[in-house]
Amino acid sequence: MLLQEKMKMIKFSPNEKIVIKFILEKQELIANYSTIMIADETYTSPSILIRIAKKLNFRGWIEFKTAFLEETAYLRTNFQDIDANAPFSKSDSFVNIASKIAQLKMESAKDTLSLVQRESLQKAISIMKNHDEIKVFGLSNVIFLGEEFVYKLRHIQKKAEIFPIQNTMFQEAVMTTSKACAICISYTGESEPLLETIRLLKQNGVPIIAVTSIGDNSLTRLAEVTLHITTREKSFTKIAGFSSLESISLVLDILYSCYFATEYDKHYDYKINLARMTESRQINNQIIRDD
């Protein structure tokens, strides 16, 4: 859940609501305000800002202010000329629809890249490298993206698995040992079957790499490290999950590529030799054909 959404949902006192309203109206201008300045303008006290921050699960005002400004900056970047939920209208021609979907995918890629944090990425790759096996957990159509990721890993000799049948996830989690790590994918971060799977994994000491939306959610709280995906779509009022699925796919490609680069020559040689030994087909297209 986005912080600004959470601010509208939590039950605050009348004076706290006045301060919340002020912060939401000011948006990025809050950067220029101290607790005393806000208290003066809202006819409240600085201590109210501390109480608000703690109700929102922050240690104090500075931590809350930093998170609020980061979220505000993110929401004002990219996706200014296209709606992730309804990128085209019924009056658009097929060619216009094609153009808008292409634009949406490019915006999703830029948005995702803006969320990549070096420390989080390095930690995720370290976890993948230092565990014998990678297990991928997700639900619904996310499974298709996970299957492609697992396919790539297996073709550079990294043991990896995904579980397309939801009913088997719990048993697989119980059977997973701390020699494996888990990549858990959920846009909302609140899918209960996935969360129950993670709880079972954590009982066995399995580290969790989360791939999920920005803001506070249950998946992020359970994970050792989180890689964020573009967070622009509503839960239900969208034509399709164009941007979220594009973002998940990109994050998984980044994980694969960074892992590949940790032993580039070894992985490259293995993949090429595997292809030469197993792929035999006549290719007439000179661009595609390997000489």
Image (spheres, rainbow, N blue to C red):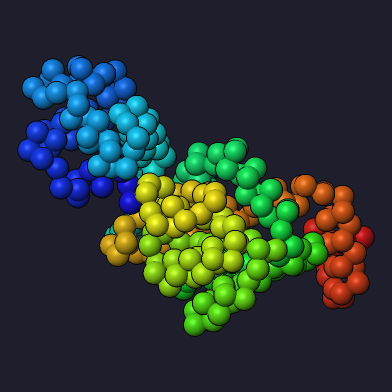
**202 left or right of 123 in image:** left
Name the residue located 37 percent from the left edge and 31 percent from the top edge.
63
Judge whether residue 130 can be spotted in this image. Answer: yes
**126 vs 27, nearest the viewer:** 126
The foreground one among 96 and 8 is 8
Q: Is residue 274 above or below residue 249?
A: below
Query: In percent of the image, x 11 and y 24: which residue is there?
Result: 44
Q: Nearer the viewer, residue 194 or 222?
A: 222
Q: Which residue is at 79% across, 62% downward?
A: 156
> What is the x, y in percent for residue 2?
32, 47
Pinpoint residue 3: horizontal percent, then vertical percent.
31, 43
Residue 125 lies, in percent from the top left, at 67, 49
Residue 135 against residue 263 in the figure, above or below? below
Residue at 82% x, 49% y is: 263
Query: Which quarter of the figure is the C terminus placed in?
Result: bottom right
Residue 137 occupies quadrant:
bottom right
Is residue 150 among what the camera can see?
no
* Count of marks placed on residues: 0
Q: Give residue 86's quadrant in the image.
A: bottom left
Q: Is residue 68 left or right of residue 244?
A: left
Q: Position of residue 38 (x, y in %)?
A: 18, 22
